[in-house]
Image (cartoon, helix red, strand yellow):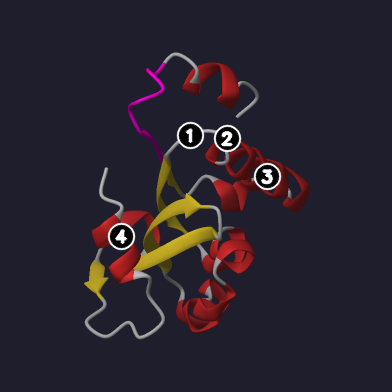
Amino acid sequence: MDDLAGTTALIPHEMPVVIITSWVLMYLPPAERTRFLNELDRLARRRRIWWVANETFESCLVEVAPQYADLAYTRTGQTALSLMGWDDRGWHVQVFGTAQVHGDAMTILDDEPTSDRSWFTEHRP
């Protein structure tokens, strides 16, 4: 995370950057999570960023998609499997499912009324 900008600079600008996190953010102090999200936001203003996350709602989605509060780890004991993209309106989020600790089991969400599904169709990598 300390050199996310330098690392993404190695990828040709015309190609999208895909960042994958899984059970990482919950181990960071809240200030470091905020720093990570701010850095992603800053990078996404300059180039196409896709973020694939298997993180708890509290460590990830609470900042970029608070409408998914019903998926809170403290309530469900599961993480949210999500894809996020960015444009000039901010982050767009698609939650595909939930997972038990360390991916032991996964549940695909059939009905997700608050998703940005059409945005993802229009902005495929």
Q: What range is drawn magenta here? A: 11-19
Q: Which residue is mark 1?
A: 47
Q: Quadrant of residue 110?
A: bottom left
The residue at the point 52 percent across, 58 percent down is: 91
Q: In terms of secondary structure, where does tag 3 sit?
A: helix
Which label belongs to residue 43? 2
Q: Nearer the viewer, residue 62 or 73?
A: 62
Q: CA distance from mark 3 to mark 1?
A: 14 Å
**Is 100 situated above or below 6?**
below
Q: In terms of secondary structure, where does tag 1 sit?
A: loop
Q: Which residue is mark 3?
A: 38
Magenta-drawn stretch contains 14: yes
Type of the residue with mark 4: Phe
Residue 84, image x and y in percent? 42, 55
N-terminal label among 3 and 1 = 3
**Is 55 situated above or below 17?**
below
Residue 107, image x and y in percent? 24, 73
Count residues near mark 2 (Cα–Cα under 10 Å), then give few for <14, some for 14-19, many for 20+: some
